[in-house]
Amino acid sequence: MMALLRSIAAAFSFLTRLPVPARAIGDGEAAAIALGRSVVWFPLVGALIGGAQVALARLLGGHLPPGLIAIALVALSAALTGGLHLDGLADTFDGWAGGRGERARTLEIMRDSRIGAHGAAALVLLLAAKIVAVFYLLPQTEPSALWPLLAAPVLARWAVVPLVVFFGYARAGGLGSAFQAHARAAHVLGATAVALGVAIALGAATPSFGDTATAMGIAAASALGVALALAVMLDRRLGGLTGDVYGAAIELTELAVLVSATVTMGFR
């Protein structure tokens, strides 16, 4: 039971800026094991973020125009994650564009805390696209219309698990060593089970779940496709992935889910 709780705490500590006490994860080898096994609970972290967004959308609905609500929801996601994934997105695009095809140069740029033109452009475009996609989802207030707000964070963190487990880590040491040592293929199945559990719970509370289930399946396929495409592209350049790539994958797959939902549900 203690190992289970440690892995859950490690997932929230790694993916969010929520205050998780260090003693809840442990130290030394226990912490490394907890971090490696935490991938099972990545979708659970997404459920908390998505649930907070749905709650805020319901709270603000009817009090603010959809455009301002959309901005507030995207800002809430960034606040809960501490902008970690957005930082990874910017670093990844800076490294890819400025690395000139060279592994060492790309990794050096990605490690640099300063943001370049390509990273800034990627951030602005992604945030704008997220806000617009959420805007088109908000006018419908039924649960069946708000499911993408919950599904996007869940599916994004589910889709990144195969990247952590099946692709090598490009740097020596660091957090990646814990994942490489303790994350296993079985954990991908565990993360999938958690994501399915969230989907079943959502379906139980959603009218006409048949239509929603189809849309969610398309969204899941979109998320996994985007994550794997990014991973293959960066793996060829770097000989592995990094934490920045994980963050970029989460942001891009969230956007893929939101865009997929606007298309399958019909936008106005």
Image: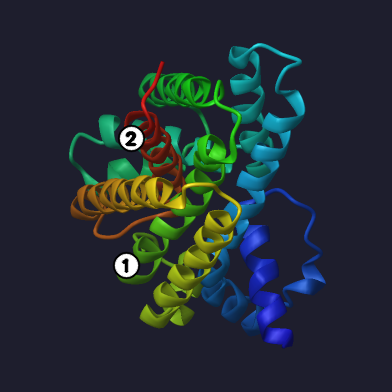
Residue at 59% across, 77% down: 32
Residue sitting at x 53%, y 42%: 147
Left or right of 27, for residue 204 = left
For the C terminus, the quadrant is top left
Tell me: residue 178, above or below residue 78: below
Residue 35 in the image, given as x and y percentages of width and height: 58, 72
Relative image position of residue 223 (x, y in whole percent)? 35, 48
Q: Which residue is mark 1?
A: 168
Residue drawn at the location 70% of the way across and 23% of the way down: 61
Circle 1 or circle 2, nearest the eye: 2
Q: Earlier in the sequence, mark 1 or mark 2?
A: 1
SS state under label 2: helix
Q: Is residue 174 visible?
A: no
Quadrant of the drawing holding the N terminus: bottom right
Q: Looking at this rendering, what residue extends furthest in the bottom direction?
A: 1
Up-down relation of residue 218 to residue 159 (above or below): above
Q: Residues within 10 Å of mark 2 (few under 14, many from 20)?
A: some
- Residue 37 lies, with reference to residue 113, above or below; the image says below
Dot 1 surroundings within 10 Å: few (below 14), some, or many (20 or more)? Answer: some
The label shown at residue 19 is none
Q: The residue tagged with tag 1: helix, strand or loop?
A: loop
What type is the residue that disc 1 sits on? Answer: Gly
Q: Along the line of sight, which residue is nearer the eye, 169 or 161?
A: 161
Q: Which residue is mark 2?
A: 264
Tell me residue 3's x, y (percent). 67, 85
Distance from Cα at disc 1 to Cα at disc 2: 35 Å
Quadrant in which residue 89 is drawn = top left
Q: Residue at x 47, y 72 (%)?
A: 193
Q: 64 or 46: nearer the eye?
A: 64
User: Is residue 6 among the parts visible in the rendering?
Assistant: yes
| Mark 2 residue type | Thr
